[in-house]
Amino acid sequence: QNLIHGRETYIADFGADFVMKRPLPTFGLDACQTWLQKQHRTKQAIDDIHAIGNPRYNIPRMVYIKNDEFQLLEERAPGEHLTASLFKKLSQRQKYEIIDGIAAFLVDMNELKPVRSVNNHQISSELKFDRLSNFIDNKMLHWFTNSEINYMSTIRNNIAEFTYDTHCAWSHCDLNSGNVLYDPQNNMLSFIDFAEENYSFIYRDIFSTLKI
């Protein structure tokens, strides 16, 4: 049974507890090689955080990667994606355990590698700022007046000038409801998809798109 066709990966069932992943069939050889390198980096990231062995959350393992066949086998994360609607239905105890588990995970991620020295972070360097600029420059003209567009452009330009000093810490960098799952029956919180793991400003994962 097929599960997901993502931007880069085709995912299929492999028994009850595992999923098999391959690059999209439209990929050429060079794209497959790039995909494979990314999976090896991801496996190392998974192994690193899994080795901490924190019982407050679960990290599904990548069992193996077959280079010659461009495929990998990964443990399936139990439960449902952690959305606001799921969180709302849970007991107070379960909500506490989820928040505690997320906090423990964030601390463990930040401490996997040394925190870097203070640097100056620019809001304009973030992906969300690029999306805001694209909306103002290319989309607003379809629905708004020129004065409204100019007003939003002024706000955008003021935001672009804002900077602040912060540490860079090792982060998941893609923490959203698609990559966090919770199994209410077993009270198991799981984190997946470490492909974007990297250094980022220290509050990157806290200000993520995970909304509960």
Image (cartoon, rainbow, N blue to C red):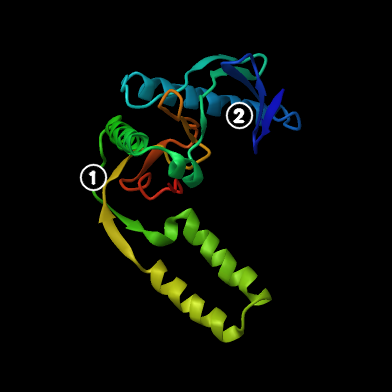
Q: Which residue is mark 2?
A: 35
Q: Which residue corresponds to the image point at 44% horizontal and 48% vertical from the top-left? A: 211
Q: Which residue corresponds to the image point at 48% horizontal and 37% vertical from the top-left? A: 196
**Pointer 2 or 1: first along the chain:** 2
Task: Please state if 161 lies on the left or on the right of 115 as rendered.
Answer: right
Q: Helix, strand or loop at disc 2?
A: helix
C-alpha span from label 2 to label 1: 32 Å
Q: Which residue is mark 1?
A: 117
Instruction: Locate residue 178, reporting x and y percent.
Output: 53, 39
| Camera sees residue 149 | yes
Tally of marks: 2
Task: Please state if 185 lies on the left or on the right of 136 as rendered.
Answer: left
Q: Which residue corresponds to the image point at 59% horizontal and 71% vertical from the top-left? A: 137
Which of the labelled discs sits on residue 29, or is there none? Answer: none
Instruction: Locate residue 7, reporting x and y percent.
Output: 65, 39
Q: Which residue corresponds to the image point at 39% horizontal and 60% vertical from the top-left? A: 123
Image position of 104 with respect to 165: above or below: above
Check the image and name the residue furthest to the bottom: 147
Q: Helix, strand or loop at disc 1?
A: loop
**Residue type pointed to by label 1:** Ser
Density class for disc 2 (Cα within 10 Å; few <14, some 14-19, many ≥20) is some
Density class for disc 1 (Cα within 10 Å; few <14, some 14-19, many ≥20) is few
| Camera sees residue 175 | no
**Residue type pointed to by label 2:** Trp
